[in-house]
Image (cartoon, helix red, strand yellow):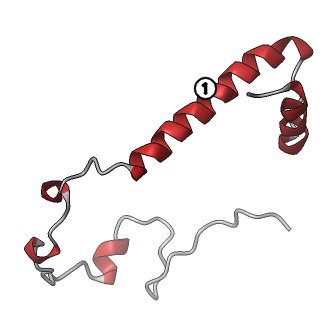
Amino acid sequence: MITDELLIKLERLSKVILSQGSYEKYKVDISNILELVNNISNLGNSNSLSNQDSINFNECRNDVVESGLTVEEALQNSIYRTSDGYIKIPKVVSD
């Protein structure tokens, strides 16, 4: 059960200010979320998956090496490419 004291602590930790009138709504919402998380956690404890549902790693496909793009092909549409095969982007962080 979510108490007012717990909600006040969550409010302080999350640095979110709730109006006193919305406490009951948030208590119900948080309780529902915790119940859902508990239900999901319990799914992992059940033996609901049979051996037929698991992956047989002996039946996976083989990795096949294929030729990829050249540097020029990969950068052909880039407006920020340099002549030596790099991408120079505009500065996004200010000093």
Going 32% across and 80% down the picture, which residue do you hit? 72
* Left or right: 41 in relation to 65: right
In front: 28, or 73? 28
Going 77% across and 28% down the picture, which residue do you hit? 2
| Image quadrant assignment for residue 14 | top right
Question: Which image quarter holds the N terminus?
Answer: top right
Q: Position of residue 3 (x, y in %)?
A: 83, 27
- Going by the numbered disc 1, the residue's amino acid type is Asn
SS at mark 1 in the image: helix
Question: Which image quarter holds the C terminus?
Answer: bottom right
Local crowd size for mark 1, using a 10 Å CA cut-off: few (<14), some (14–19), many (≥20): few
Residue extending farthest to the top is 21
Q: Position of residue 6 (x, y in %)?
A: 85, 34
Going 87% across and 11% down the picture, which residue do you hit? 21
Going 64% across and 66% down the picture, which residue do you hit? 90
Q: Position of residue 37 (x, y in %)?
A: 55, 39
Residue occupied by mark 1: 32
Question: As displayed, is residue 77 above or below residue 58?
Answer: above
Question: As displayed, is residue 8 above or below residue 87?
Answer: above
| Image quadrant assignment for residue 69 | bottom left
Q: Position of residue 81 (x, y in %)?
A: 47, 74
| Image quadrant assignment for residue 57 | bottom left
